Every structure is written in C-alpha cells, then in structure tokens.
Amino acid sequence: MRRSEKVEEGEIIEIVGKRVRVALPGGPAVLPIRAKVVIGDIVTVVDDVVVEAQDRRTVLRRGSKVGVREVCANASALLVVCATIEPPFRPGLVDRVLASAEEAGLVGGIVLNKCDLGMPEDVLERLALYEELGYPIFLVSAMQEKGLEKLQDFLKGHTTVMVGHSGVGKSSLFNALAPGRARTVGELDPEGRGRHTTTGGILVELPTGGRLIDLPGIREFGLEHVPKVELRRCFPELLPLRCRYADCLHNGDDGCLVDGLVEEEQIDELRLESYRKILEEIS
Ligand SMILES: Nc1nc2c(ncn2[C@@H]2O[C@H](COP(=O)(O)OP(=O)(O)O)[C@@H](O)[C@H]2O)c(=O)[nH]1
Ligand SMILES: [Mg+2]
Ligand SMILES: [Zn+2]
C-alpha cells in the first residue's frame, strides 16, 4: 500500500530553469512542476512536486507576435519604469503597460528613473497628463537612491510588478529597494523561452513592506488577448464617452465623438494614437 501523501500549499517566488522556487510553510524549496505555473501562483505541492495552481485573484498577460502569455499571478499593481533620458521616454510603451494594468485589474503607475540626469520639459508634461488620468507617478534616481520613500510607501500595500525597457534601470531600482537580492546591472534582458514559465522572474518581500516582482524577460507588451470592444475600458479617458453607437470603437466612424474631443484638447492626441495603434493590432 502507498504511504500517505504530503500535501502543502506554497507560492511560486522564482523560476529556476525548468523548476521553480516555492515558498512553503517550512521555508523555500526548489521543486519540479507538473502544472503550468507563473510567478505569484499559489500552488498545491504533493510529495515535493508542484501539481496544481490554485485560483488566481489576478493574472497579467502580455501579447506578442508569437502569442499570448501569462506572466504573473496575484499581483495588485503594475509599474512601468522609464528613464528621463538614455533610453528616451516612450509614451507608447507607457500607454501599453497602463492599458495592460487596467485589463488585468491592477493599479497602474509610472516610475521615472534617472532623475539625476535632469528633467526634460516634455517628459514632465507627459507625466502631468498621466497624473490627471489618475496614475501615480514616482520620480526617482535608483543610482543616487533619491525619491524612494514615496515609492516605498506605495509598494507597502501591494504585490507590484515592475516592467520597462532594457536600460531604464529596473535592476538598479530593484537593488535599491531590495538590498541583498542583487540583480545584475547593465545586463540585457533575456527573452523568456521557458515552456511553462517566464525566464528568471523573481518575487521578493521588501524590507520596507510589500512585495516586488521583477520580470526581466519582457520586451513587448501587446494586447492581442483583449477583444476590440474591451480595449476602450483600458483607457480611462474613453470610458465616459457616449458616441452614437454604444459599441463605438472610437476609430473615427460616423457618430464618434473622439476626434472632436481631441480637437477641444479634452482627450490627448498621443493617447488616442496609442489606443488606435493597439486597436489595429487586435484582429
Ligand atoms: N544616471 C543614472 N543612471 C542609472 C540610474 N539607474 C540605473 N542607471 C544606469 O543605467 C544602466 C542600466 O541600468 P540597469 O539597472 O541594468 O537597467 P535595466 O536594464 O532596466 O535592468 C546602468 O548603466 C546603470 O548604472 C539612475 O538612477 N541614474
Ligand atoms: Mg536588468
Ligand atoms: Zn467613438
């Protein structure tokens, strides 16, 4: 007769090649997986094997040309990390990430890093717009460890995912927020290739409170998984619009109010451009 099974509940805190590091009641362990899991998943572990992911409160997805992937589970906030310069601020990427946050039901926000290099006027103007839309903005310098208090205050209440283009200072910021959990600075992000998982993601508890997920494998943030009519919900300024048709996609068709509102500067032109560009990518 088979001896009784050991059943535990754990949380996926790191992807280690084809295995995962799981936080278990008795401490973390690297275990094999028999189910599709992502960082942040609460899982059932039977006899030291991850057999099942439990129901998720949230799931963050990202689309790309090769399909849609789940990147992490149970997060509550998504911050896009940008730089003042080097690399330049890219509103298109910011819009995509914020839209992904809306879609996943996460609180979206922006971290502007490298503030020690000066603050370009046009970037500040863009940020004022995002702030008006309700997104929290954090101005920091990871290198000089400046501006971190306000960010840490925000992080306290959340499990936060940080994404951003290579070179903006994600690893530096991660190291400043979670000392001792060193991420390599100045390294190009690998593209995730794991069959079941993303490459190299990690979830850590912050000494100042809250939890942080670093997902280095992410370069694109497509929204191919969002139905066309749902994309409107991912842009808060489009929500109150009452065009002639209730299912108006705001692409300038008969009876659409959007272009008029852009003209009146009630809706930002670049935001609308981002929306329409994403809309076009959704088949
Ligand atoms: N001036 C300045 N440089 C920074 C800052 N944060 C990171 N860097 C530099 O930017 C480069 C990329 O940083 P890294 O953390 O690897 O970015 P990642 O690719 O987003 O993980 C490195 O040369 C860092 O030293 C900052 O706050 N100010
Ligand atoms: Mg990095
Ligand atoms: Zn419309």
Image (tube, rainbow, N blue to C red):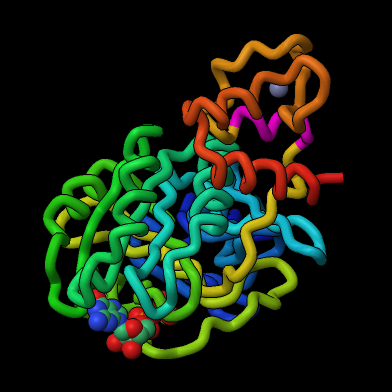
Residue at (82% x, 19% y) in the render: 254
Question: Where ligand 1 lies, by quadrant?
Answer: bottom left
Q: Position of residue 105 (x, y in %)?
A: 52, 35
Residue furthest toward the front? 263
Q: Residue at x 37, y 72 (%)?
A: 170
Residue 127 horizontal/vertical position (percent): 34, 49
146 or 213, nearer to the observer:
146
Image quarter where the N terminus lies is bottom right
Residue in the image at 68% along x and 34% along y = 231
Residue 277 shown left or right of residue 131 in the figure: right
Q: In this picture, is 121 found above or below 125?
A: below
Q: Which residues are magenta?
A: 227-233
- Whether 257 is drawn above or below 19: the answer is above
Locate residue 194: give its quadrant. bottom right
Please say whether residue 181 is visible from this viewpoint.
no
From the viewer's perspective, is 126 left or right of 96? left
Drawn side of residue 141 relative to residue 110, left or right: left
Q: Provide residue 211's location: percent of width, then percent of height.
A: 31, 55
Looking at this view, is 261 or 173 the one in front?
A: 261
Choose top left, top right, bottom left or bottom right for residue 259. top right
User: In percent of the image, x 51 and y 87: which residue is there?
Assistant: 188
Residue 229 included in the magenta stretch of the image? yes
| Closer-to-camera residue (206/250) | 250
